[in-house]
Image (cartoon, rainbow, N blue to C red):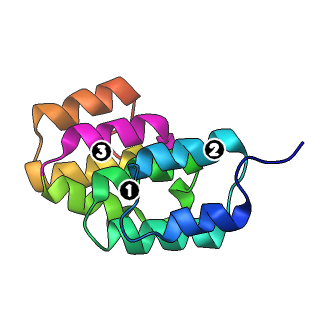
Amino acid sequence: AESIVTQEELIQILTQKTPKISPQIWARVLKVSGQMPPKPELIRFVATRLVAKKQLTQAIDVISVLGLERDFEPQQIILPLVNLGKFDVVHRFANKHPFLRHYVVTTVGKIRGKSSTVIRWIDQWRLNPRH
């Protein structure tokens, strides 16, 4: 079967300055199509087109969809979102990626103190607050 979109066409879409669709939809299309560009290309796209331009909510969605969550340092993405008060986005991301939960709770705790948000997340995720 012939693919609907070639890898070269996907990379062109990937590198467009003004994509016609949102990065989140683009990531879902890539995943469903099975036509994934090489991982370094995906990481570069997220880093240069989204993270560097402070489009962090979109970056988090694309990272989750494409399975790149271990390819970015949490302080690159989570810390700026916490500083912006985007706790719902951070919570959603940590819900999908349990290995980030302690970092999220610690980071939010440092900024907000022992807020009800932090306490609720510790309970929800059954974290040991001593760690």
Q: Quadrant of residue 10?
A: bottom right
Residue 25's mark?
Answer: none
Residue 37 within the magenta-colored segment of the rendering: no
- Name the residue: 33% across, 61% down: 77
How far separated are the C-alphas under marks 3 and 2?
22 Å
* Horizontal side of residue 13 vs 61, given as left or right: right
Instruction: Name the chief secondary structure element in magenta.
Output: helix
Q: Nearer the viewer, mark 1 or mark 2?
A: 2
Per the image, label 1 sits on a secondary structure element best described as: helix
Q: Is residue 64 visible?
A: no
Per the image, label 3 sits on a secondary structure element best described as: helix
How far separated are the C-alphas under marks 1 and 2?
15 Å
Q: Residue furthest right?
A: 1
Residue 88 within the magenta-colored segment of the rendering: yes
Q: Which residue in the structure is indicated by mark 2?
A: 31
Mark 1 / mark 2, whichever is N-terminal: 2
Q: Which residue in the structure is indicated by mark 3?
A: 90
How many C-alpha atoms fall within 10 Å of the one at disc 1: few (<14), some, or many (≥20)? many
* Horizontal side of residue 88 vs 64, given as left or right: left
Q: Which residue in the structure is indicated by mark 1?
A: 59
* Horizontal side of residue 45 vs 116, given as left or right: right
Q: Residue furthest top?
A: 124
Q: Position of residue 22 (x, y in %)?
A: 38, 49
- Name the residue: 39% across, 42% down: 93
How far separated are the C-alphas under marks 3 and 1?
12 Å
Disc 3 vs disc 1: Cβ atoms closer than 8 Å? no
Please provide the residue range marked out in magenta. Answer: 85-99
